[in-house]
Amino acid sequence: MSQPTTGSQPTGQAHGLGGLKYDPAKRTRAPEWNVALALVIMVAIFEILNRLNGGSFLFNMRDNVDAIFNQQRIDIMLLQVAIVGIISLGVTQVIIVGGIDLSSGSVVGATAMVTMSFAQTALVNGNPNPKAVFGPEWMDLPVLIPIVVGLAVGLFAGLINGLLVAYTKIPPFIATLGMMVTARGASRWWSNGNPISFPTESYGQLSNGDLLGTLTFGLVHWQGQNPALVFLFLAVLFHLILNHTLYGKWTYAIGSNEAAARMSGINVDRHKVLVYAIAGLLAGVSAVLLTSKNLTAQAGMGVMYELDAIAMAVIGGISLSGGRGSILGTVLGAAIFSVIISGFTSIQLDAYYQEMVKGAIIVGAVILDQARQRKRMRA
Amino acid sequence: MSQPTTGSQPTGQAHGLGGLKYDPAKRTRAPEWNVALALVIMVAIFEILNRLNGGSFLFNMRDNVDAIFNQQRIDIMLLQVAIVGIISLGVTQVIIVGGIDLSSGSVVGATAMVTMSFAQTALVNGNPNPKAVFGPEWMDLPVLIPIVVGLAVGLFAGLINGLLVAYTKIPPFIATLGMMVTARGASRWWSNGNPISFPTESYGQLSNGDLLGTLTFGLVHWQGQNPALVFLFLAVLFHLILNHTLYGKWTYAIGSNEAAARMSGINVDRHKVLVYAIAGLLAGVSAVLLTSKNLTAQAGMGVMYELDAIAMAVIGGISLSGGRGSILGTVLGAAIFSVIISGFTSIQLDAYYQEMVKGAIIVGAVILDQARQRKRMRA
Amino acid sequence: DGIGVSMALFDDNFLTVLRNGIQAQADAGGLKVQIEDAQNDVAKQLDQINNFIAGGVSAIIVNPVDTSATQAMTDAAAAAGVPLVYVNRQPINVDTLPDNQAFVASNEVESGTLETIALCDNWAAEGKTEVNVYVMQGELSNQAAVQRTQDIYDVIEAGKCKVKVNVIDQQTANWSRDQAQTLMTNWLSAGTAFDGVIANNDEMAIGAIQAMKAAGIDMKTVQVGGVDATQDALAAMAAGDLDVTVFQNAAAQGSGALEAATKLAAGEAVDQKVYVPFELVTPANLADYMAKN
Amino acid sequence: MSDIILETRGLTKRYGGVHALEDANFILRKGEHVAVVGDNGAGKSTFVRQVTAVEQKSAGQIFFDGREVNFAGPLEAREGGIETVFQTLALADDLDVPSNLFLGRELFKFKFGPFSWLDKKAMRDRTLEALKTTAVKIPNVDNPIRNMSGGQRQCVSIARTAAFASKLVIMDEPTAALGVQETAQVENIIRGLKERGIPMILISHNLRQVFDLVDRIVVFRRGRIVASLRKEETDGNDVVAYITGIKGPADNVAA
Amino acid sequence: MSDIILETRGLTKRYGGVHALEDANFILRKGEHVAVVGDNGAGKSTFVRQVTAVEQKSAGQIFFDGREVNFAGPLEAREGGIETVFQTLALADDLDVPSNLFLGRELFKFKFGPFSWLDKKAMRDRTLEALKTTAVKIPNVDNPIRNMSGGQRQCVSIARTAAFASKLVIMDEPTAALGVQETAQVENIIRGLKERGIPMILISHNLRQVFDLVDRIVVFRRGRIVASLRKEETDGNDVVAYITGIKGPADNVAA
Ligand SMILES: Nc1ncnc2c1ncn2[C@@H]1O[C@H](COP(=O)(O)OP(=O)(O)OP(=O)(O)O)[C@@H](O)[C@H]1O
Ligand SMILES: Nc1ncnc2c1ncn2[C@@H]1O[C@H](COP(=O)(O)OP(=O)(O)OP(=O)(O)O)[C@@H](O)[C@H]1O
Ligand SMILES: [Mg+2]
Ligand SMILES: [Mg+2]
């Protein structure tokens, strides 16, 4: 039998390794493109609607300010998704590995309560702190302590999630639903439902400061608030980790085919624990920034964040059955979310309609994404 | 080549069709057994805890009443899960078909608002109804009208869910998440967030009456409140439908392998629409009973019901990846839920701890179920 | 332009009346208001305020989710130079508000106190000296729930109650009529004798009443108290089921807040603190409140 | 009326940039059994998926039973009379054997739309009969298919197709996972179809089997049909030469 | 030291009530190639799953490389030196070919626990080389495996096993889905293993192949080992007689 000419011809030529005709120009475009397109369309719509009212969604209309964009709008749009966005980075990884995390919102709530208890200041306007949880010796601690406590509590909750999912083999939906209920209970129990307020000044600066100052690029300014900086930094970090490290490869592999990953010699259980732990840690980061930004912690904090975080990832093109998705997609999903929130306020849409339209937009964005992917497949 | 002795020997003998040794006594037990066991254990624990306090969880301790069981406890345990239980019957079918329904709680809320608007009475204590939504000509309507309206609204929401899932191919998580947000918005918008109250007497009787009167079996009595009756009737009905009709067979087949079902000539899309529509219809039934029981409708009604309904199904042994599960399991799951609620109150556990323990019990029940299933597989 | 309003929660009956008060006042004055729902989320509320600022509103009204979380809002508005009015709930930084900020609020301490004392008086009038009661709490993470429950114990401890009160059990029904109904039935199934139910709001009180009526309890033999004086509660009171509720003038608060906001936007000076008192409602003065909420 | 049951003209399928099937002109006559052979990745299964409308073709025409068809999905193809054993088996893992065999064609005690009452006993009995024809051994037909061996699953799939065969049968590597006995049995089933005059397309890598069973052999290579050989006029070496590209149209490889 | 690389004593596996594997006593010597044959459902794959610890055995002992082993899972079995091509392929559908080939054995630019940096280029280059040995044609190795044909997937799986072979190789029906050329190529790979002295268990329904490649043939029937035949002392008819139960221990059928 003669040997045919196969060999490793570089792909991208008219014929690939298998001798089939291969046309790289027509290859399926990364799904993130569709999400980016949806984002642009949405911004354009809000811009038009604002112009009809004589305003502008994105651009600066005040004569006294020398800037291209409406700086405050840009600032708030980055700021308002930063905190849920950070959770969403963790949720993205959990979904890619084939799981789901319903607990992230409640974990933020519980972590917020505990963290804030270690961030309180002793004197408020000269009087003892009326919301004190512990005695005065636990007040005015260095800012590092509440930060470490917050990260540790988040990590701990994530670890429990991971251990449950990996070693008891119960569905992640259940494990994290249990954690959701439990963590919410814990956050109410911690201070009997009382809010915990009045952090030290340095703790408040964590979120309300701008580490790098206002960043100016020509006529484009950005205040660069810390939560947004942290979000963007973590997004880049996890983008690199997911695409270039063993951690990322295994995360995708397990989500794609857990049995195969196991047979290939991946320690699936340990890796899952790691992924859930990282998600918990990110919830901890989120809780620290959230309490610092609001200067208070409440038992009800973070309610529904888990759904927002999942929605961001899904709008970003993730597959809920695992194995697919990207950090870039999630960041774009977060951007769409933010545009919706700010856009509605900017056009003064009645709050009654906002929720209804928001639901429709989430669904619409995903439909658009799916339809375009299918179309390309058929072409 | 000679033909070996195969043929259709009846199973249950020492050798099955394949000639392998087959021992029917050791066959894997239905997963519902484990759930039932968990239920019994939980009841026993609460009984013991109550006895330690000199009371009883399930049994009648009053000398003046001639009954074995604490009748009121049995009544409330049936009643308190009936309404979420009805939703859960629909959610069970949606999960078996490979989907998920996050919208059921919100659909109950929206349906409740609309339904109640058609169930109002004209005069309250002799004054015009202060919560009137429509003019007086829309008041004091025959009870059938709000019922039909309620079922229709629920059905409509379910239809939309089904059409989205079946024909746009977006993940059910997203479709129903969108519906969840939208329906909640709609329920707020309907009457600007105002509650709608004061139904006609006959409407109130729907839930607060007992159609069959108190049912007595020897020394066991059951008040037989309508919502509980409806729940049990629907459970039996859908148990039969899922096990003996084409609808059931296709539901399991699609959940098990959608591509296979499609290739086998099942109209998968139409069937999915039907399943989601039925789930919506059940949410409608639930909304009618809920408003009738409470004599009011509020925009916030049904919040979190979707999670409770899913939790019931999952505790009942359903697989969230579809193709497996049963109505019997869900009913048992609902029973466990009910025991938890009543059990906590009976031992006067502090409310702050209840949530935490509830989360742990949900997780624990599922772990137990899984562990026992795995053990039997290994034996 | 226009005025931005951030409400703590749309689903809340009382806050809905307040919201309607703002809207009615605005319509009457030909003002544009943009009302947002913070859905009980402090963080969302702060974001909404920032979005208002980005949109260039002339003033902001906030119904705070958390009264101890107002400093960040005050700072945000002050930095942008936009006037701010807190409504219904007294902000923690009320004494240090900048000049262009104000508040129109009520003191939750009054509500639970009025309710408890009135119930105590009723029991005393019935000739009782010691009573057993159930306490129904609102959502545990909600301050009104925490405060109104605390009020009960404060009244007892301060000796302002004419009878001895034993709390048999205290549980949450999350402000909800449905959950209250379930909770009450569960309590009833324990068979313990009791003299009344103190609920953090009217919805839960009504749920408890419905459960008791379903169990065949004569409503004359128990005292039930709530807070809010909603229409449903007033009807229940008229029917002789509910004994005590507490009225808070939501509409007046709403319109008062809007008035303050408009003045501040126009650069006029206003009173920085406006207290709207709670009012006790019993069958005796029921008629006065029929048309108010 | 012509005697052609299936014809494709210029049938083409592209996945993104991959041209998996190009310009396939294929004819199947009534009663004829044709084998499709070719290397892995030559486009055989892709061809089947276009004909049965599991996927939508990129270009080309399909004529079935005398008229042009544009099936919207496999459901329509099956209703049109095309029965297929797919390479990735179309089985519902959680259902038992009878349910799989009768999937989409259940027997009823009484009919009432989707709520028709199933006749489980009849389906079970007829399943046992149908399985006998494949000689497969299954310890307990009431177990879910999930737990069965590769060959057992394959047999369930074939038993189904054979039982409901009507105008055209397509089998994509039906005996790949089968043992010696079962393969012989399946080959008997295929001969039975031939006797009943039911036309068939058989995809197989087993040239011995192909020469045993069919009338004509169609060779796929790199997404194209490169030969259609009458069995009597060819032999194994000839077919292999076409498969590997020694014979046939020159490769138009650019590089 | 004995020359036995793998031995099982009384290996037994029950699924619920189904006795899929009973009392299997099996010996494999160093450098030996053994075929396992048997009907569909005879328990061949079950045997493999016990040896590789994909499932936990119900009873019996396994000795590997001189000592008794109780692998907790396939990970340990692989680390112990057993490389396997499973019947249900162990591939991650969403990953590309290099990722699958190196799954669990990635190459790094630098190591840092789970966050070690991958050397993608090296993996891709070595993948192209490894694929050459199987003669499979894959249009674009950077596409996810999901979209590849049955044969292409099979080849990726075999390429992986061949590339990392160490103490023992097990292949469960490796050529079932392969074309003529690819089958020949895989048979060459197996001959290469023999030359390198690596022992192997080959499961196959293709008796021609079995007689071509191995030293000894072990026959499974109804969950039991019924014969172990040296290639020189047997022939095809003899093997088939054992497979079908004409020869061998009497069936102890109760009914
Ligand atoms: N969805 C898809 N996306 C991209 N490429 C695909 C897709 N499906 C198939 N292909 C490619 O098309 C080619 C033809 O595949 P096909 O399954 O038709 O091969 P085949 O002839 O059936 O091979 P085998 O004998 O191995 O089953 C292969 O190169 C495969 O990688
Ligand atoms: N998880 C399981 N539960 C129940 N029965 C099982 C399970 N796995 C396998 N079986 C049964 O065990 C028997 C042996 O299966 P096995 O897969 O080992 O067969 P095999 O010899 O590999 O067949 P083939 O040649 O078809 O691959 C079959 O009858 C099968 O139905
Ligand atoms: Mg193929
Ligand atoms: Mg096998």
Image (cartoon, coloured by chain):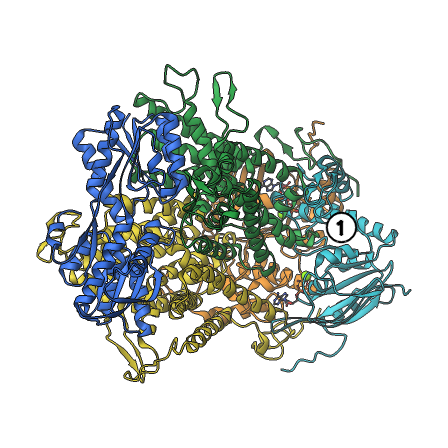
Chain colours: A green, B yellow, C blue, D orange, E cyan
Q: Say which residue appears at 79% left-offset and 66% top-offset.
A: E218
- Which residue is the site of mark 1? E161
Which quadrant, please, contains the N terminus of chain C? top left
**Above-or-below relation of D248 to D40:** above
**Above-or-below relation of B312 to A83:** below
Apparent side of residue E154 relative to residue E193 in the rendered image (left or right): left
**Above-or-below relation of B327 to D250:** below
Q: Position of residue D73 (x, y in %)?
A: 47, 47
Taking the view exactly as shown, the residue that stands out farthest to the right is E1
Of B340 and B199, the residue lying toward us: B340
Instruction: Specify whether residue D109 is in view.
Output: no
Apparent side of residue B33 relative to residue A18 in the rendered image (left or right): left
Q: Where is residue C219 in the image (x, y as percent from the top left)?
A: 19, 68
Q: Which chain carries label 1?
A: E
The yes-or-no answer for disc 1 within 8 Å of ligand 4 is no
Q: Say which residue appears at 31% left-offset and 74% top-offset.
A: C192
Judging from the image, what secondary structure is the residue with disc 1 in?
helix
Apparent side of residue D204 relative to residue C236 in the rendered image (left or right): right
Q: What residue type is labelled 1?
A: Thr
